Image (cartoon, rainbow, N blue to C red):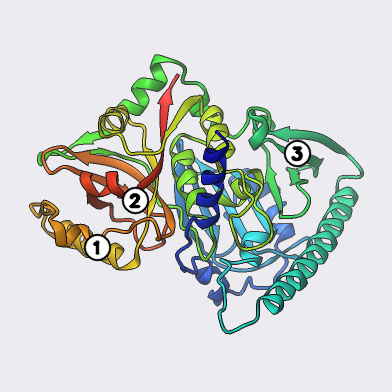
Amino acid sequence: MKWFAIWVLALAQSLYAIPNQVSRAVNQADSPLNGLEVGNQLLSAGLWQGEQGLPGNWRKENEIAGAQTSHLLARPKLFDLDVMLLRATHRKNSLESVTATFVDAGSYFPYLTKKPDVPIDIQRQGLLNKQVEFKKLYSETFKKLKNHLVKRSEGKVKESHWGRSRKLRADILVYDLGVVRAVLYTENGRLLRLTLTRDRDLYRKGWLDKNRLSLLGNDLTRYYQNQVMQSEDGDYLIQGVHTVPQGYKPYCGLNSLTMVAQYFGLHIDEDWMAVAGGFQNTGSASGSNMLGLYNATAREAGLSISREVKFIRSKARSLIKSGLPVVVWRRFDFKRNLTHVKFARSHARNNSLILPLPDEADRATWPGGDHPVHASVIIGFNDERKEVIYLESWAGQSIPRRMRYEEIEATATMVFYFEGK
């Protein structure tokens, strides 16, 4: 199977990123909290007792197993350190956690594009310089943050980990700050993140939400089956799979996986996925272990997973009817993508529109072996129309798209089928 491993590596290296600056709203927000210290507010007993709200303007993200996530439209300071992203999780209107991301390699090393007008040795040196800068930033920020937490907790720290499967396991340091506990991810070299929470059980049961963890066997099977809606025009569509925008990162395979992981009830995002998947600080997916990451995510969600080098129509239909989305890696072309975008918009206005049976001219526009690989999430199908319904990991593209069975079968390079145990 050596040829298979080499082939998979080649696919991982070419998984495509679509330019899309999803962090622009945070970076460009004209907020009075920009550069302002918010530590006292986030450590206030009144905040965690529900007597006062979070500071600033927050934008909703996804709902994960009944827990609502949102992020602050500002770039404040926490413990006198710059925060890239401040994210909150609420459950039934009660604050459950606040997570601050201080340093993230995915944002520091955006999608690596080759510049034909710049000598390759200069490009390599530029990347090396950037890696040195990032390592210094990470180390200095990590040291300052740990020192601050030690002082605030009077040295009360506990080593632990979060996550059941070894691949997704995160080593953490837990500091008792009185009102809350501060949970520091200790992965050294890519992501620096701190979570504040009062929930003492939050970091004992892994990434899977406690509501989903309570469902076992037939109860879990029925839960996913109940997420499937059948429309009058023949669509079978899974509800509750939300787009997780990938930004200008080589993360389509990660974000597609994150979309289904969050649907399965895992409180995990694409940045930690990149850490767990072994992404390097290069702006490329090269060297990552994507297959191991997909396997670990299924195990963490209490599911099994199989993969095929082709799209199997009957298998995909059966799983989607069971409420289990399918992730497909497929050949991608920008012009062909525009065709799907236009049809999705037209279909949203008039759902009687049908993709035509592909003729020779249409097939000539399908991407082939010389095109890059991109990942998508299939959340539905329509047998009468012979279409799959799928989502992309791009901001502003939450309208499901449609593709004929013939095209997805011709362009798929690897398909991941999540299955119940």
Q: Secondary structure at mark 2?
A: strand
Of all residues shown, which one is farthest toward the left?
Answer: 352
Residue at the spot x=70%, y=79% of the render?
122
Residue at the spot x=45%, y=64% of the render?
18
Of all residues shown, which one is farthest toward the bottom?
Answer: 117
| Residue 208 in sight from this viewpoint | no
The earlier-in-sequence mark between 2 and 1 is 1
29 shown above or below 300: below
Q: Amino acid at mark 3?
A: Asp
Mark number displayed over residue 57? none
The earlier-in-sequence mark between 3 and 1 is 3
For the residue pair 203 and 287, the one nearer the viewer reads as: 287
Q: CA distance from mark 2 to mark 1?
A: 21 Å
Q: Residues within 10 Å of mark 2 (few under 14, many from 20)?
A: many
State the quadrant of the N terminus: top right
Is 81 positioned to the left or the right of 391 in the image?
Answer: right
Mark number displayed over residue 391? 2
Q: Amino acid at mark 1?
A: Thr
Q: Position of residue 257 (x, y in %)?
A: 48, 44
Q: CA distance from mark 3 to mark 1?
A: 47 Å
Is 163 positioned to the left or the right of 23 in the image?
Answer: right
Residue at the spot x=50%, y=50% of the render?
11
Q: Secondary structure at mark 1?
A: loop
Q: Which residue is mark 3?
A: 171
Q: Position of residue 129 (x, y in %)?
A: 77, 73
| Residue 395 in sight from this viewpoint | yes
